[in-house]
Image (cartoon, rainbow, N blue to C red):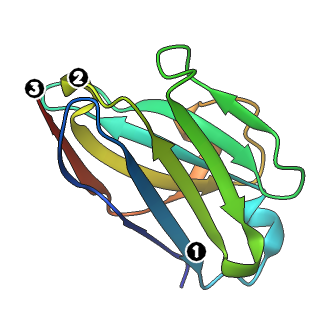
Amino acid sequence: LVQLVESGGGSVQAGGSLTLSCVASGYTDPYSRQCMGWFRQAPGKEREGVARIYIGSGSTHYADSVKGRFTISRDNAKNTVYLQINSLKPEDTAMYYCAAGSWCPGLTQSDFGYWGQGTQVTVSS
């Protein structure tokens, strides 16, 4: 059973930082987790992609709205992907989801076949 478990969310003040983690387990086919991404869904809004990383090469891709503040990284020895968020803004308040896929040139949600349950980030002004 493939599992993606996110952690690291919380309530922070604007201007602060958080690092989210996503641990992957249960993979029998490594090709099903060639890339991993972070998505978020704010209340009343559609889920949007924020960052993606290829597990092998470390190649990254970011949504324009988060470039310069969000950093995605991975620790392959720990099967973990991270999302560092700096200079948090109230509009970053959302449920953040980790996802995995085989081929993810961008942040198209249908390219990601496995999803975690999410971790909540709340930013107060």
Question: Closer to the camera, 18 or 102?
Answer: 18
- Residue 2 occupies quadrant: bottom right
Q: Residues within 10 Å of mark 1 (few under 14, many from 20)?
A: many
- Using the numbered discs, state the Cα–Cα distance from disc 3 to disc 1 in whole angstroms: 33 Å
Q: Could you tell me which residue is drawn at 58 percent across and 74 percent down? A: 24
Q: Could you tell me which residue is drawn at 57 percent across and 21 percent down? A: 67
Report which residue position mark 1 lands on. Answer: 24
Residue type highlighted by circle 3? Ser
| Quadrant occupied by the C terminus | top left
Question: Residue 33 at x, y = what percent?
Answer: 72, 63
- Using the numbered discs, state the Cα–Cα distance from disc 3 to disc 2 in whole angstroms: 10 Å
**Is residue 96 found left or right of 37 in the rendered image?**
left
In the rendered view, would you say 19 is above or below 51? Answer: below
- Using the numbered discs, state the Cα–Cα distance from disc 2 to disc 1 in whole angstroms: 28 Å
Of badges 3 and 2, the one in the foreground is: 3
Report which residue position mark 3 lands on. Answer: 125
**Is residue 60 found left or right of 20 in the rendered image?**
right
Residue type highlighted by circle 1? Ala
- Label 1: which secondary element: strand
Question: Closer to the camera, 35 or 9?
Answer: 9
The numbered mark at residue 45 is none
